[in-house]
Amino acid sequence: MISRRRWLAGWGLLSLTYVSLAVVRVLSDGDVGAAVVYLVAAAVTFGFAAAVIPFVVPRRSDDGDDDSSDGGPGPGGDEPEPPPWWPDFERDFRRHTDGRRGAPGGPPPPRERTPA
């Protein structure tokens, strides 16, 4: 299923084609009237797409009941297991960042709060 974003991007590219034709027409012939027609066509095309796509392209359900397995992360997806070295990396990285508190280039040490 093609997402709404991709549909709108495709129609946007068509609108961009009209805009580029308008620019070429003005630069080559100096015909501003034809360029205006192309610019109007670009605006109508993109406006039509932006108005119609939400009604034509179905929205994906995010309710968690999606049992389609599309291979991607998320509900119903086959999210890959983390690699076996990941927990060790996270532990070492956390130890590294905690040890840098107050060091040059590291985050500043936490300030103690004094009662006001």
Image (spheres, helix red, strand yellow):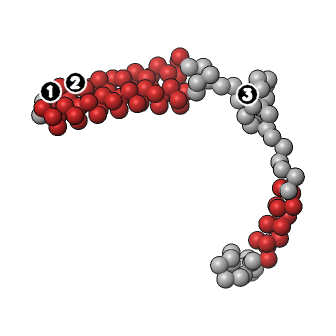
Q: Residue at x 33, y 23 (%)?
A: 44
Secondary structure at badge 3 equals: loop
Give the Cα separation between the discs numbered 1 and 2.
Answer: 7 Å
Q: Position of residue 101 (x, y in %)?
A: 74, 78
Q: Are marks 1 and 2 in contact (CB under 8 Å)?
A: yes
| Residue displayed at 52% across by 22% down | 54
Report whether 2 appears left or right of 39: right
Choose the circle earlier in sequence order: 1 or 3. Answer: 1
Residue 73 position, x and y percent, is 74, 37
Q: Nearer the viewer, residue 28 or 15?
A: 28
Q: Is residue 111 visible?
A: no
Q: Residues within 10 Å of mark 1 (few under 14, many from 20)?
A: few
Where does label 3 land, which residue? 70
Residue under circle 1?
A: 33
Q: Which residue is mark 2?
A: 37
Front residue of 26 and 36: 26
Number of labels in the image equals: 3
In front of the other: 109 or 46:
46
Gap in Å between the C-alphas at discs 1 and 3? Answer: 49 Å
Residue drawn where x is 82% and y is 61% of the image: 90
